Image (cartoon, rainbow, N blue to C red):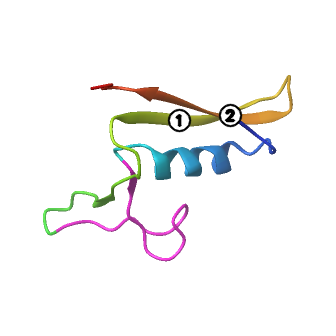
Amino acid sequence: MNLNTTSTRRANSIAFDMREAGRVMREGNPITGKIITDEKGNPKSKPGTLKCVKAIGWSIEEYGVAQISMNLTNIV
């Protein structure tokens, strides 16, 4: 998916919200805030919205756009 931006940070943020694994929970700002951990010190995570999806975002400088690539891991 092409985005109307060159921001890798924005593309990755959208990808984290979409993918099944979700994102690490943070205090305040969801991108730069302090990571929230459980009682054992492991980072807590917030699940994404799409099951069986892996996603990542990056920027393609030659085309002046950022992209999100998504893979389906189970089509059943």
Residue flagged by tag 1: what amino acid is it? Ile
- Percent x, y of residue 42: 22, 57
Q: Image point 26% across, 65% down: which residue?
A: 37
Vertical side of 48 occupied by 37: above or below: below
Image spot of residue 57 (x, y percent): 60, 37
Q: Which element is circle 2 on? A: strand
- Examine the rendered structure and indicate whether residue 16 appears above or below residue 74: below
Instruction: Give the x, y percent position of residue 34.
Output: 44, 69
Residue 31 occupies quadrant: bottom right
Q: In 3D space, how far apart are the residues under numbered discs 1 and 2 (Cα atoms)? A: 8 Å
Query: What amino acid does circle 2 point to?
Result: Gln
Residue 29 included in the magenta stretch of the image: yes
Quadrant placement of the C terminus: top left
Q: Quadrant of the N terminus?
A: top right
User: In the rendering, at what x and y percent does residue 23 appear?
Assistant: 41, 53
Magenta range = 22-38
**Residues marked 1 and 2 touching at CB (< 8 Å):** no
Disc on the earlier residue, 1 or 2: 1
Q: Identify the residue position indicated by label 2 in the image.
A: 67
Q: What residue appears at the point 48 percent right and 35 percent down from the top-left corner? A: 55
Read off the residue under disc 1. Answer: 56
Q: Main secondary structure of the magenta part?
A: loop
Q: Is residue 18 left or right of residue 62?
A: left
Examine the image and state in which quarter residue 4 appears.
Answer: top right
**In this view, which residue lies farthest toward the bottom?**
28
Q: Secondary structure at mark 1?
A: strand
Magenta span includes 66: no
Using the rendered view, name the quadrant where residue 12 is placed. Answer: top right
> Residue at left 42%, top 43%?
19
Query: In the image, 36: left or right of 15?
Result: left
